[in-house]
Amino acid sequence: MNFVRFTMNRQGMWAGGSEYRLRHTNAKYGIPRKDLNHIHSLYDWFDNNLKTPAFCSYNGWRRFWFKSTSDRHVKKACELAEILSKYFSVYEWKTNNPGNIVYEDDHQVAVNNRINEK
């Protein structure tokens, strides 16, 4: 199975408060309201369609990867990455071996912070 993840400025798009900052301090980034509303709607979609494991209220010790078979989630992540790339450095990572899996559901895996990214 293949896995994919996106990072923004070398952090996960949800890591290190990235999502919070985008939701609450948009003036700092100069993101137009139309794009900001789209970003918010995508984060809301993930809030409603992607589980957050109980141990991950702060995921600094884990990295999350989408399963490539989770087409809808990967498509939404690509959409989010496309918008964010207008304002930030966004990277797409793919691997066959994401690392030591410590959590898994239908759409994603979480691994310890040691990874083999390509």
Image (spheres, grey):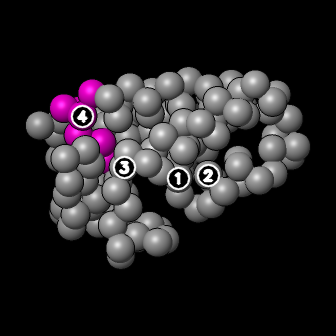
User: Disc 4 and disc 3: Cα gap in Å?
Assistant: 11 Å
> Which SS class for mark 3?
loop
**Mark sitting earlier along the chain (4/3):** 3
User: Disc 1 and disc 3: Cα gap in Å?
Assistant: 12 Å
**Mark sitting earlier along the chain (4/2):** 2
Tag 1: amino acid:
Trp
Look at discs 1 and 4 and give the one toward the viewer: 4
User: Disc 1 and disc 4: Cα gap in Å?
Assistant: 18 Å
Residue tagged 3: 50
Q: Which mark is residue 14?
A: 1
**Mark sitting earlier along the chain (2/1):** 1
Quarter of the image that includes the N terminus: top left
The x and y percentages for residue 4 are: 31, 37
Residue at left 46%, top 72%? 57
In the foreground, 46 or 79? 46
Span colored in magenta = 65-71
In contact (CB < 8 Å): disc 2 and disc 1: yes
Look at discs 2 and 3 and give the one toward the viewer: 3
Residue tagged 2: 19
User: Disc 2 and disc 3: Cα gap in Å?
Assistant: 15 Å
> Which SS class for mark 2?
helix
> Which SS class for mark 1?
loop
Residue at left 55%, top 43%? 43
Tag 2: amino acid:
Glu
Residue tagged 4: 70
In the foreground, 112 or 108? 108
**Mark sitting earlier along the chain (1/4):** 1
Tag 3: amino acid:
Leu
The x and y percentages for residue 112 are: 29, 66
The magenta stretch spans residue 92:
no
